[in-house]
Image (spheres, rainbow, N blue to C red):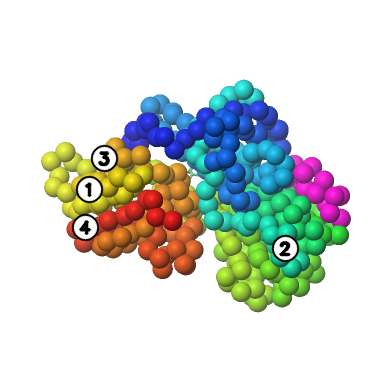
Amino acid sequence: MTAVTTSTRFHPLRVTRIDRETPDAIAVTLQPPPQAEALFRFTPGQYLTFRRVVDGEEQRRSYSICAGLDEGALRVGIKRVPGGSFSAWAVDRLQPGDVLDAMPPEGRFGLMPDPAAPPRTILGIACGSGITPILSIATSVLAREPHSRVVLLYGNRSAADIMFRTALEELKDRHLHRFAVVHVLSREKHELETLHGRFDAARIQALLPGLVPPGSIAEAFLCGPEGLAESATAALTALGVPHEHIHVERFTPAGGTLAPRRAQPPAPDAQPAATATITLDGVTRSVPMAAGETVLEAGLRAGLDVPWSCRGGMCCTCRAKVTEGAVAMDTNYSLQPWELEAGFVLTCQSRPVGTQVSVDYDAT
Ligand SMILES: Cc1cc2nc3c(=O)[nH]c(=O)nc-3n(C[C@H](O)[C@H](O)[C@H](O)COP(=O)(O)OP(=O)(O)OC[C@H]3O[C@@H](n4cnc5c(N)ncnc54)[C@H](O)[C@@H]3O)c2cc1C
C-alpha cells in the first residue's frame, strides 16, 4: 500500500477549462498558483504527474502536455482506459474550478524549438492518446521555426476516436505547406485502402516515403500505447532513419499491462538484505532494504519524499544517479543511453547488487 504522503513536490493547479475531445477523452486546462508559475514552464513533449487519494491510497498518474509553447496555457489530454481508475474519474468527473495536485513538468521526450536552426522536418507517429505530446511538439515547432515542416501519422480506431481533431485541422489551415497529417483508421473504411487497417510497421513503411523522404527526417517522435513503439521503430529503421533520431514515449509497458503499483511490505522480523543510502533534497539518509525491494520502495517505506509516478519504467519521475555500488534494473523504457552511461537509473525498477547502494536523486 502506498501511504498518502505530504510531498512538497506537488502544487495545486486549478482546472480552468475542460474540452471534450471525444466521448472518451478530454483536454484539461490548468492554472498554476502565481508563485509556482515559473516551475510549470515546459519543453514540448513533457508530462505532468498528478496525485489523487482513493480509498486511503495515493495514486499518481502522468499526462503529457498537449499545449504549444506559445498558447499561454498549460493543458493535458486524458483518454479513458477501460477499467482505469484515474482516467475514468477525470473524464467523467473533473470540472472547471476543481483543483489537481501536480508535480512540475518532467521528461526528456520532445524538443525545444530553435528559431535559429536550419529548416528541418520533424516526424510524429502517434496512436490514440499518444497524440498529446506530439501535438505540443508540432504546434511549438511550427510556431517557432518558420521554415521547418512537421509530418504526422496518426492512428485511431475510428474518426470519432480522433483526439484534437479541430486543433490538428486548425494547424493544417495555419501552416498549409509545412504541416501534413495523415489519419489511419483501423475500424473504419476509407476511400484510400492504405489509410484503413492496422497501424503496423508494414503500413507505416508503405505510407512514409510518399509523405517525407526518410533521409530528410531530422527527428522522429513516436508515442502511443503498447506495440506502437516497436512497430514504428522497426519501420523507421527499415527506411534507414538512424536510431539516435528516433524518440519514443510509452504510456504502457511493452506487455500492455502494468505491474502492481503497490510495494509488498517486508515481514516485521525480516533482517535487512541491503542498505540504501539516499540523497534527496540535499539530505542523505541510510535506509534498510528488504529482500527483493526496489530502491524506491525502500525510500517510500522509510517515509522519504522520493519522487515517483508510473512505477512501470515508462516515465522518469523516479530517476536518480547511482553514486556507490550497483543496481540491476528490471525494465527501462525512458532513460537515454547517455543517462545509463552516466549512472542514472529508474529507482522503481532498481534492486541492489550487493548489500550497499547509494543513490542521489538531486543529481542532474
Ligand atoms: C510518461 C507518461 C505520459 C502519459 N501521458 C498520457 C496522456 O497524455 N494521456 C493519457 O490519456 N494517458 C497518458 N499516460 C497514461 C496514464 O498515465 C495512465 O497510465 C492511464 O491514464 C491509466 O491510468 P488509470 O488510473 O486510468 O488506469 P489504471 O487503474 O492504472 O489501470 C487499469 C488497467 O489498465 C491498464 N492500463 C494502464 N494504463 C493504460 C494505458 N495507457 N493503455 C492501456 N491500458 C492501460 C493497466 O495495466 C490496468 O490493467 C501517460 C503515461 C506515462 C508513463
| Residue topped by disc 1 | 286
Mark before the other along the chain sequence, 4 or 2: 2
Under 8 Å from ligand 1: the CB of mark 4? Answer: no
Number of residues whose C-alpha sits closer than 10 Å to that of mark 2, classed few (under 14), some (14–19) or many (20 or more): few
Q: Where is residue 257 in the image (x, y as percent from the top left)?
A: 47, 49
Query: What whole-number distance in Å separates the C-alpha atoms at marks 3 and 4?
Result: 16 Å
Label 1 environment density (alpha carbons within 10 Å; few <14, some 14–19, many ≥20): some
Q: Can residue 11 be seen in this view?
A: yes
Q: Which label lies toward us, 4 or 2?
A: 2
Q: In this view, does 284 lie to the left or right of 227?
A: left
Q: Give neighbour class at mark 3: few <14, some 14-19, many 20+ (Cα, 10 Å).
A: some
Predominant SS along the magenta part: helix
Q: Residue 356 carries which label?
A: 4
User: In the structure shown, which secondary structural element does the residue marked by tag 1 occupy?
Assistant: strand
Residue denoted by label 2: 116
Q: Where is residue 283 in the image (x, y as percent from the top left)?
A: 30, 45
Pick out the residue farthest to the top.
Answer: 97
Which region of the structure is painted magenta? 159-176
- Number of marks present in the image shown: 4
In the image shown, does 358 or 210 lie closer to the viewer?
A: 358
Residue at the spot x=31%, y=60% of the render?
A: 323
Residue in view at x 41 percent, y 49 percent: 318
